[in-house]
Image: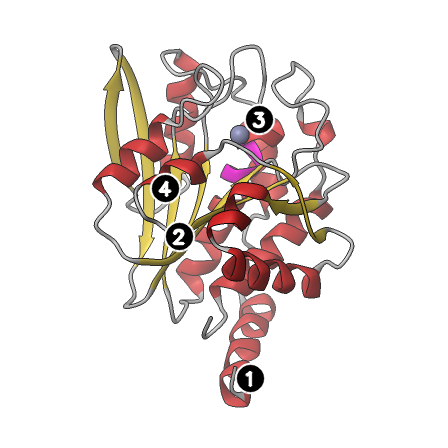
Amino acid sequence: MGKYKFLKEAILVLGFLIFSPVQAKGPYEYLKEFCKIGERVPGTKSHLQARDFIIRNLQNPEIDSFTVDDVGYYNIYKRFPGKEKIAIAGHWDSDPNCPGANDGGSSVALLLALADTLSRVPSDFGVDLLFFDGEDVDGAALYGSEHFASRCVDNYLFVVVIDMVGDRELKIYKEGNSAKFFPQLVDSIWRIGKEIAPDVFSLQIKYFIKDDHISLIKYGLRAFDVIDFDYPYWDQEEDTIDKCSKESLDIMKKFLLSLIYRNNY
Ligand SMILES: [Zn+2]
């Protein structure tokens, strides 16, 4: 990255932090509000309430609805246009009998906080924020990402899928499928993570996960999964907000902003 471009980036971000007239909500504040809705199981009333919460907190999002077995699903996209594009994605639904504070909730909280920043400080990249529905149906049906990817005509430099990234003991290993398909990309992204949070990011692979990145890869998108799978409350009733922390979400926000405001890859 050139010196000038780095300076421009630093000034933009600093300017935003110091002179922002209204203090934007952080991801933890969004998570607290989102978790009040409860479970987000497709076909239920609280699922629709969660959908409306996300829509309410975005300016002019695109709603891409579809049905599977007569159940309504809603992908929500917030696009910040640009010539070269990246995307950041997460699912917003939750498993039955699991509040999904970290699983799904942490992704929503971060995507909403990123939307706030992007609406004030444009990136040189186009950035699409993708809220997928129906990931957690029947284990991992990945309905929303499959629906999106099978119709996607955009050419992204890459798509970051974030899932379970708000827990108190945050540790992000390379995910095996991501590293298998895109070893260099994943390595360079994890090195950026290590610069920002050396204790959080590890260059080792620990798990191979079926998550939304699998549908995206299937349709030719350069997608990888950023996930902390060492989370004992995964798919449990105990996946509640007290297992998440403001510090972890702020680290992830910083990491994602550094991907968004970088000038080249
Ligand atoms: Zn998940």
Name the residue type under label 2.
Arg
Instruction: Between label 4 and label 1, give the one nearer the viewer.
Output: 4
Q: Which stretch did the figure color magenta? A: 104-109
Q: Residues within 10 Å of mark 3 (few under 14, many from 20)?
A: many
Main secondary structure found in the magenta portion: helix
Q: Position of residue 64 (x, y in %)?
A: 25, 34
Residue at mark 3 = 35
Residue 50 seen in this snapshot: yes
> Residue 19 lies in what quarter of the image?
bottom right
Q: Indicate left or right for 77 with 224 as reference.
A: left
Residue at mark 2 = 222
Residue at mark 4 = 216
Q: Is mark 3 within 8 Å of ligand 1?
A: no
Identify whether 237 is placed above or below 77: above
> Residue 149 lies in what quarter of the image?
top left
Name the residue type under label 1.
Leu
